[in-house]
Image (cartoon, helix red, strand yellow):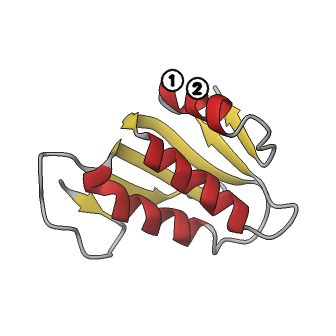
Amino acid sequence: MDVSLGGLPAAPPRHGARLEAHPLSERPGVRVVGEVTLDTRRAWQEALGRLAQHGGTPLHVELSEVAFIDVAGVTDLVTAVRSLPKGQRLVVHRPPPQMARVLDIFWPGEGRIEVAP
């Protein structure tokens, strides 16, 4: 796994999975590239933790270059949103198709996450 967090140390490679997270320049948020799996979960959680430190609403997560996100990764996203100050929300841009399905199945009423095509 190649894990790059914009200057943070990379996690040791395993199983070929990779995850990169880069801050968005035009709005508060992060662009993620790769796969969100057990092997890259720590990096995903760190990226979400840094995202939660941004001010303003909404926060943005660009996932158009994420090939796969597992249920644990979606759980981490919901947990991160629920840790944000009241009234703050998150817009997820172009996530993998399974992400919207997982949100609908397990967290159908989570109104603080907006999935944008």
Outermost residue toward the front in this view:
106
Residue at 52 percent across and 45 percent down: it is 74
Spot occupied by residue 79 in the image (x, y as percentages of width and height): 62, 59
Spot occupied by residue 81 in the image (x, y as percentages of width and height): 68, 58
Give the residue type at disc 2: Arg
Q: Which residue is mark 2?
A: 101
Does 56 sit left or right of 68 as displayed? right
Is residue 50 in view? yes
Q: Is residue 35 above or below residue 97?
A: below
Residue at 58 percent across and 49 percent down: it is 61
For marks 2 and 1, give the one nearer the viewer: 2
Element type at mark 1: helix
Q: Are marks 2 and 1 in contact (CB under 8 Å)?
A: yes
Is residue 28 in view? no
Spot occupied by residue 16 in the image (x, y as percentages of width and height): 13, 45
Give the residue type at disc 1: Pro
Seen from the viewer's position, the closer of residues 61 and 40 is 40
Looking at the rendered image, the quarter that the C terminus falls into is top right
- Counting every numbered tag in the picture gives 2
Q: Which residue is mark 1?
A: 97
Q: Is residue 116 above or below residue 47?
A: above
